[in-house]
Image: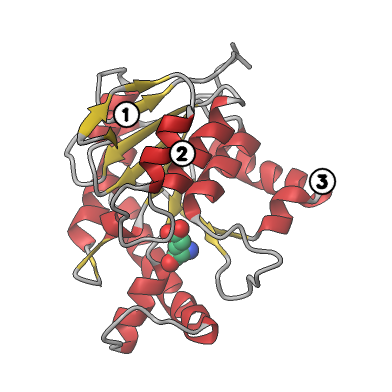
Amino acid sequence: MSKSGIIVIKIGTSTLTLDNKLDLQNLQRIVKEIALSKKKAIIVTSGAIVTGAQKLGLASKPKTIPEKQAAAAIGQSVLMRQYEKAFEKFGITTAQVLLTRDALTDKERYRNVRNTLTTLLNEGVVPIVNENDTVSTEEIKVGDNDTLSALVSELISADILVLLTDVDGFYIKDKKVDVIKKITKEIRFAAGHSLTEIGTGGMITKINAAQICMSSGISVFIANGRERGAINSIISGKKIGTKFCPKKYR
Ligand code: GLU
C-alpha cells in the first residue's frame, strides 16, 4: 500500500464552540497538536454558521437559508483569522478552500481541487476546507462536513481521516466500540438513534463518511475533540476513540 502521509482532520461545531460561541482555546490546542505532529494535514472545519451568528449577536442558530448563508459568510472569515493566527505561531501558513459538491463530482474541477491541495501540502501549507455555505444551494451542496471530509480524504488519497466530535467514539447501547471492520445494519441502527451533537450530521453522517473511506483504503477515527493528545495518539497507533478499518489496500 502506498502511503500518502496525509491526514485529514474534521473539526465539528461541537468541538469548536461552547455555548454557541467560538471556543478559541480548543481551536488553538488542536492547531498546536496538528502543527507539532509535522504531518501533511488538511483541516475540514465546521463552525462558520455558529460563529457568524455569535458575531451578529443572534440568540439562537439561524434558521432561514439567507440567514444561515449570511452567518456563514461572516463566521468563515472569523474562523480563518483564528486558524491563521494560531498556525502562524508555528511558522505555518494556512489556505482557505471552500468547496461545493460540483467541485468534487465534475472531473475537471476535481482534478483542479486535487492539484491545488497537493501543491499547498507540498509547500507545507495547511489547507482549511469548508463547504462554501454562502453560495451552496440544495442542488450543489454536500450538506454536511462529515461527508465533505470523506470526499476530500478520498480525493487526496489520505491515510487517515479523524472526525473530532463531542463523544469518545461510536457507541452501541452505551458501550463504546473500539474497532469496526464492517458497517452492519446494527451499526446503522445505533447511529440513527444516537444523541446527535449540535452540528449538522450527528452519527449517521459519520458512519456514511466511514463507509466512503473504508472502501477507498482510508482509516477513519471518531474521537473526542476535547481530549488532549488525541490526534497524536491516533497517528502513533494508540488505541483511542473508534477506529474504522479500511476494507482493502489501495
Ligand atoms: N459548513 C457548516 C459550517 O461551517 C457546518 C456543516 C457541518 O458541520 O456539517 O457552519
Where residue 27 appears, as percent x and y from the top left, is 27, 55
Q: Nearer the viewer, residue 56 or 115?
A: 56
Q: Nearer the viewer, mark 2 or mark 1?
A: 2
Q: To which quarter of the image does residue 167 belong?
A: top left
Does mark 3's beta carbon lie closer than 8 Å to ligand 1?
no
Q: Give the residue number, with chain letter if any, for mark 2.
A: 207
Mark 2 to mark 1: distance in Å? 11 Å
Q: Which mark is residue 94?
A: none
Q: Residues within 10 Å of mark 3 (few under 14, many from 20)?
A: few
Q: Position of residue 168 (x, y in %)?
A: 23, 38
Location of residue 151 with respect to 75 vertically, above or below: above
> Residue 163 location, x and y as percent?
38, 41
* CA distance separating discs 3 and 2: 26 Å
Q: Quadrant of the C terminus?
A: top right
| Residue toward you, 42 or 181 | 181
Mark 3: amino acid: Lys
Disc 3 marks which residue? 107
Q: Is mark 1 within 8 Å of ligand 1?
A: no
Q: Position of residue 170 (x, y in %)?
A: 31, 35
Which amino acid does the dot numbered 2 rest on? Ile
